Amino acid sequence: VGRADHRLPECDAESLAEKDGMFYVGIERMEKIVRFDYRRDGLEARGEPIKVPDDFKTFTFNKSLECLTVPPKGSPLAGALIVITECSLDAQGNHRSYILDGDEVARFSVLRSDDFDVSDCTMLPPADLLLLERRYSLARGVAMRIRRIPLASIKGGATVDGKPLIVADLGYQIDNMEGIAVHRNGAGETIITLVSDDNFSVLQRNLLLQFALVGE
């Protein structure tokens, strides 16, 4: 008989995506995606679990639903929900990933390299996915990376990769980077925003970083 650790919460909301007034939240440990109909119910919206593949139950504990995103209209996979796991790996050691489109499910993998784990993702219009990754070890310290993956490469059965936009360690002003977002400012620049999580630790910081993307 298994024994639950009462010190661990039963769930951990780790990822968020919006589509047509619906907000989708990925919940680790429970391995569920819940949908909030903000368009209909506003702040009174309640989470409704959506149908997910049965193999979500086989994800590595506390290393699963870190990345949810929805490709924009007019792009490849528009309207589908893209799911990439933090460090639930396939037989080849790559990140298990999914395309959820109504009742249709396609599985693909994201190449894992240099011991980085996925911590979030977002869309870079018109047709790229930005994957935020982090790495920590006693020997190598803390690092972060952002990879740019073309949506056109994402399809069932594929193993995808992308070129890094940035790789940084503690020689720069980073910490445990966990969130990423993209917007255009009034000057027409593409701005990438990153946020860190201090995990209630005096050794970590809450940071908000912004970068202007050049040479698009």
Image (cartoon, rainbow, N blue to C red):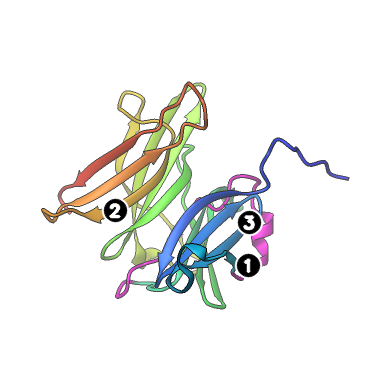
Q: Front-most of 204 and 114?
A: 204
Residue type of the residue flagged with mark 2: Val
Which mark is drawn over residue 31?
3
Quarter of the image with the N terminus in it: top right
Image quadrant of residue 170? top left
Closer to the observer: label 1 or label 3? 3
The secondary structure that dominates the magenta segment is loop
The answer to whether the residues at label 3 and label 2 have Cβ atoms under 8 Å apart is: no
The Cα atoms of the two marked residues, 3 and 2, are separated by 26 Å
Residues packed near mark 3 inside 10 Å, few (<14), some (14 to 19) or many (20 plus): many
Image quadrant of residue 34? bottom right
Which residue appears farthest toward the left when viewing the image? Answer: 187
Residue at left offset 48%, top offset 70%: 41
- Identify residue for label 1: 53
**Residue 48 rendering spot, x and y as whole percentages:** 59, 67
Residue type of the residue flagged with mark 3: Glu
- Is label 3 in a helix, a strand or a loop? loop
Viewed as shown, does residue 177 lie left or right of 9? left
Q: Earlier in the sequence, mark 1 or mark 3?
A: 3
- Identify residue for label 2: 182
Q: Is residue 61 magenta?
A: yes
Which residue appears farthest toward the right when viewing the image? Answer: 1
Write down the region rendered in magenta: 50-75
